[in-house]
Amino acid sequence: MLDIHTATAQPHVTRRADYTPPEWQVPDIALDFDLAPERTVVRATLDVVRNAGDGPLRLDGAGQTLLSVKVDGVAINDWRFEGEALVVPLSGDAHVVETEVEIQPDRNTQLMGLYASGGNLCTQCEAEGFRRITYFPDRPDVLSRYRVRMTADKARFPVLLANGDPIAQGDGDGGTHWAEWNDPFPKPCYLFALVAGDLACNAGTFVTMSGRTVQLGIWVRAADVPKTAHALEALKTSMAWDERVYGREYDLDVFNIVAVDDFNFGAMENKGLNIFNSRYILADPDTATDYDFDAIAAVVAHEYFHNWSGNRITCRDWFQLSLKEGFTVYRDQGFSADQGSAAVKRIEDVRGLRAAQFPEDSGPLAHPIRPDEYQEISNFYTATIYNKGAEVIRMLATMLGPQAFRAGTDLYFQRFDGTAATCEDFVASLEEASGIDLAQFRRWYSQAGTPRVKAQLRHDTGGGRAILTLSQRVPSTPGQPVKAPMVLPLKIKLFGADTARALSEERLVLLEDDAAEIAFETVTERPVLSINRGFSAPVVIETDRTATDLAFLSAHDDDPFARYEAMQQLMLDTLVASASGMHADTDAVVAAIAGTLDDAALDPALIAEVVLLPSESFVGDQMAVVDPEAIFRAREALRREIGRTLEPRWRAAYAQAAATGAYVYSPEAKGLRRMKTVALGYIAASGAADAGALAFAQFEAADNMTDRQGALTTLVSSDAPERVAALDIFYNRYSDNALVLDKWFQAQALSQRDDTLAGVQELAQHRAFTLANPNRARSLVGAFSVNQRAFNAASGAGYRFVADQLIALDKLNPQTAAKLLPPLGRWRRFDSARAALMKAELERIVATPGLSKDMFEQASKSLAG
Ligand code: B3K
Ligand code: ZN
């Protein structure tokens, strides 16, 4: 056994450049599980075939007890351990290797490998969890056909599921039963899954485009079956969507989803047996918000889409992770856009990108979407790989156009089906199908950092010409001091300041050099620049547009996203100025919001997004040194002014949205509910005496969680006397529903009150708080650390609290702990006093005895980068 602390002192670095093909392939594997939470015995039979080199067979392993090894049916003892890997000398080029190991699922707090959750047994193998189940070459380019036999106590584990199709089942001795499953599609071991449990099924069917009937099942605790209808519907819609939009048909006879309460992230795309965090399956109007319903559909779609982008074609190595994740996020974004308002979906996605990925890209953990090295691959399931990865695919789709893009994805799916591919294979397929040269575009895969684009528009009134000057700069990032120019597809259009007419068609400009000039002819009036429409490139745009120009675009641009964007920029400019102690013209913001609220042609869902102020952290991201208190004050002051000045409009919007009758889940009804809570927030911000009562009335009368949570969130940040009552009522009503209690913790962690830190410290002692459940840990610690003002309290107590929690969590679940570390790594963005306090916490973490390599990598890079 390696000493963990010694291991972290000299971390092992895996490099993309060092890739070599596997020495042995394993075309077939049979697994036989004797399942019990306290002790599970796993017998693995591997058919191994030499693939390259002349070395012994090297099988990864971690944390299990080896009981026996056989080669070609004969027990051997000339095997050895290298670290935790099992090395088996083999004389020929094809052998059968059998191992028997013992594992303890109920002691598995990392939730990687085979573990217990809520009395059931389940697995999580991506990225490197399979080695915690049995000895195997745990790398994604070893593809095998799996045959799985499970035996377990029948009363305790009546349901036995694995990948592929069920082939046999029966009863055994001593109250046991068994089941066999066979997955005919070769897959890497990270896609292996099994579930044993006391579960009920919401069953359905789907008839594929070629007429095959697929049995669908969503497996949950019996009491939760009524909460699975939305997920099942979303699954069917996703299956049809992937056929229609990408020509992808499902391939097995069954598709099962199991929901578990203890899960390190959202869900997992195991072949034919997706395993989900229950928060992305269970929903009814009383317990789930509109946001939750949308997220469930998006995650169900995402995991389903992986069946092609991830499973049928997998990754050659983990550096290629964005091949499956970026593309699959792009696919699920397209799916969600088609279910309701595409503009609102785009706004949400861009907001998410700016909240999570932009800070990552400008901080110590910045990495390209195809990284060059890692210590712990679990740390690379990042917003960069996923969300920037999706933006890169989106740019490709924009540049190629829909037909060529589809021809490119068809070629990719056809050519690489059944293989472990690379990002290069994907780009080359698009290049070949479209005839478009993507040589320089490939820099998006290798260069980290968010490009910054300067745009200046000059108008020659006499000649009717406008010249747009563009320049780009990619900031340096750790290990990449110098950058080459990227290909930036920018959608651009000009509008006339006097008439509000379009002065040009929308143009797709490819900025490929450091700088370029674009001419627009017959520009007969002063033009206003609309740029990066639809957020066509994931960049930061800097322009000299005035508040008047931005207000104009927020009212007249014909791209809804661009209207949102203009309003955001106007708000940001105002907030940054006032947080920096400069004069800020708030009237322009108030007038622009009034104009938006009065625009009867706009969808309420869009209005609700457009009138929201940018988050405190996004304002902070625009400043040379983040001043959390000043940002908070500036934002609160602006909120109050918007609330007060437009109070009659907020009340009217509130009344209109509230008058919609009983709950339905539809894009229109969602938009109105969103508007209702946004209006409520502004009424409260105005300081109106009845705001607390109004929020409490909404809280009490709500027939759905969206309205109830909206009211609670408003109250939680207020001084209203109703605040404590609402929190108590909420707690008591939902004390037996873990997913809703997470909302209760989260709302308090995100509160804008002065006493949030003290409240959160107290909540960490609450009887319902536990670090053992990742959702609960994230709902308090994760939420608190993105509450910019509370987390960055000048005393450093917020930093200390988070560091204490992460050190404790690391002992149970390193992967989830390491995911929550990045906010502490943002010390360079703050004043020297806060920076010193944050660094001290990072140093304390790095010096913790027995620290995991997950945490070591995140914390040490955060100190150094
Ligand atoms: N592929 C999984 C993520 C696995 C994360 C491992 N640390 C879910 C998804 O992206 O669909
Ligand atoms: Zn994914």
Image (cartoon, grey):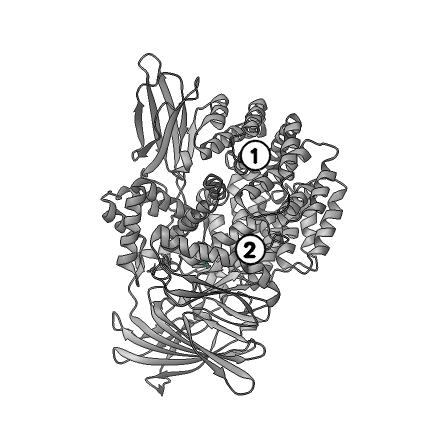
**For the point 53% across and 34% down, which residue is it?**
610
Q: What is the distance, in whole Å, between disc 2 and disc 1 at their CAs?
A: 35 Å
Task: Identify the mark nearer the N-term, 2 or 1.
Answer: 1
Note whether 816 is above or below 461 in the view shown. below
| Residue placed most toward the observer, 333 or 468 | 333
Find numbered disc 2 in the image and state the secondary structure of the residue it sits on.
helix
> Where is residue 271 shown, x and y percent of the image?
41, 65
Residue at the farthest front position: 211
Q: Between tags 2 and 1, which lies in front?
A: 1
| Residue placed most toward the observer, 582 or 429 | 429
What amino acid is at disc 2?
Ile
Q: Quadrant of residue 544?
A: top left
Q: Quadrant of residue 287?
A: bottom right
> Where is residue 380 shown, x and y percent of the image?
43, 54
Note whether 541 is above or below 857 in the view shown. above
**For the point 43% across and 47% down, which residue is it?**
333
Residue 427 visible: no
**For the point 43% across and 18% down, which residue is it?**
499
Find numbered disc 1 in the image and state the secondary structure of the residue it sits on.
loop
Note whether 24 is above or below 803 in the view shown. below
> Where is residue 694 shown, x and y percent of the image?
72, 38
Q: Residues within 10 Å of mark 1 (few under 14, many from 20)?
A: many
What amino acid is at disc 1?
Leu
> Where is residue 351 shown, x and y percent of the image?
49, 41
Judged left or right of residue 521, residue 375 is: right
Label of residue 613 in the image: 1
| Residue placed most toward the observer, 703 or 712 | 703
Label of residue 845 in the image: 2
